[in-house]
Image: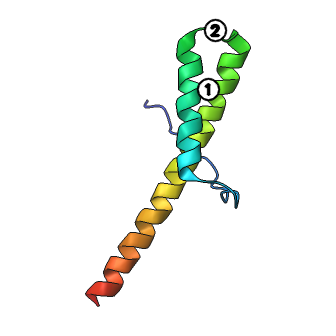
Amino acid sequence: MAPRKKTAKVQPLPEDWHYETAVEAVAAIVERLESGELELGDVFEQFQQAVQSLGQCEQFLQAKQAQVELLIETLED
């Protein structure tokens, strides 16, 4: 039996959220993780934060893609 993919609840992004800032934060986390200087508990915390940020990025990009598709449909009508 194949493992089931968990679906996260979609929550609205905070008003002060920015895609570029989130990507920079994830890059900084990856750099800290790769440094090997974090304690194990911090590794899990940082990884969880990165996964959450990447989920927000995906949510943002999917919303923008839907907007673009709607605009294209409007132009075609």
Q: Residue at x 53, y 48 (%)?
A: 20
Q: Which mark is residue 25?
A: none
Residue nearest the viewer, comparing 69 with 15: 15
- 37 over 33 or under it: above or below: above
Q: Residue furthest right?
A: 41
Image coords of residue 61 (percent x, y)? 47, 56
Residue 39 image-quadrant placement: top right
- 38 over 30 or under it: above or below: above
Q: Residue at x 58, y 44 (%)?
A: 22
Q: Helix, strand, or loop for circle 2?
A: loop
Q: Name the residue beneath numbered marker 1.
A: 47
Residue nearest the viewer, comparing 8 with 12: 12
Q: Name the residue beneath numbered marker 2.
A: 37
- 36 over 13 or under it: above or below: above
Q: In the figure, is residue 64 to the left or right of 25?
A: left
C-alpha distance separating marks 1 and 2: 14 Å
